[in-house]
Amino acid sequence: MAIKEILHNTEEKMKKAFESMNRQFHEVRTGRASPSLVEGMHIDYYGTPTMLKQLAAISAPDAHLIVIQPWDPTAIVEIEKTIMKSNLGITPSNDGKMIRLSVPQLSKERRQELAKLIHKMAEDGRVAMRTIRRDAKEAVEKLEKDKLISEDDKFRGIDELQKAVDRYIARIDELLKNKEKEVLEF
């Protein structure tokens, strides 16, 4: 395995870890209604876990309301159960055809709790990046130990790894800054 291949695989892993963290950030509820709060939920649809966005049209007609209109009205009960079990803290109401979620304003204490939560998520993302870097660094060092690359190539590879990690950590920090501003805004 060449250094370029290790770097490419590492970049792919970092990209996936970043996207996962980004999805988690979008699921954190702010005071504003957004379809992204619920569209990633997995609903038990005839015994198969299915994402809500595949089962229904989801919209936010105003800043405090999310409307979920399932294509199969029989799924309403399962969708409602899943929303109740989630940690959103919103009680759904349905009229047999659609589900309405009224998103209340967040209290100052809840906003601060959410800010702590997103800080923890961001730190978990940074740790994931450093873990990926460590694994890739060990792979590069093994190539040098097995005499497949020179010491200079090893140092260049490790330097490239560090640059990739720095790029992704900067993106995580930017995402954190924006989400924190969104959460703490009244």
Image: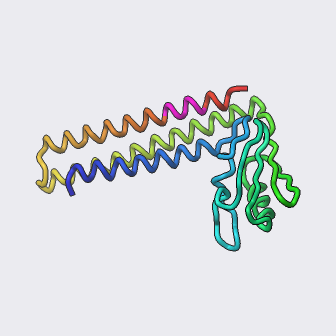
Where residue 55 appears, x then y in whole percent? 68, 61
Q: Residue at x 86, y 60 (%)?
A: 96
Residue 141, above or below 110: below
In the image, taking residue 127 as reference, residue 52 lies left or right, namely: right
Residue 37 x/y as whole percent: 68, 46
Q: Position of residue 140 (x, y in %)?
A: 23, 50
Give the colour scheme of this rendering. rainbow
Q: Is residue 186 left or right of residue 92?
A: left
The residue lying toward the viewer, choosing from 45 and 62, is 62
* Residue 177 magenta: yes
The quarter of the picture where residue 178 lies is top right
Residue located at (55% from left, 29% from top):
177
Taking the view exactly as shown, the residue that stands out farthest to the bottom is: 47
Quadrant placement of the C terminus: top right
Establish if 47 lies above or below 20: below
Magenta extent: 173-179
Q: Quadrant of the N terminus?
A: bottom left
Picture coordinates of residue 103, whole percent (x, y):
79, 41
Q: Is residue 30 left or right of residue 149?
A: right
Is-magenta flag for residue 81? no
Give the main secondary structure of the magenta stretch.
Answer: helix
Is 124 placed above or below 78 here? above
The answer to which of 125 and 39 lies nearer the viewer is 39
Residue placed farthest to the right in the image?
Answer: 95
Q: Residue at x 76, y 53 (%)?
A: 68
Number of numbered markers? 0
Quadrant of the rendered image containing residue 70: bottom right
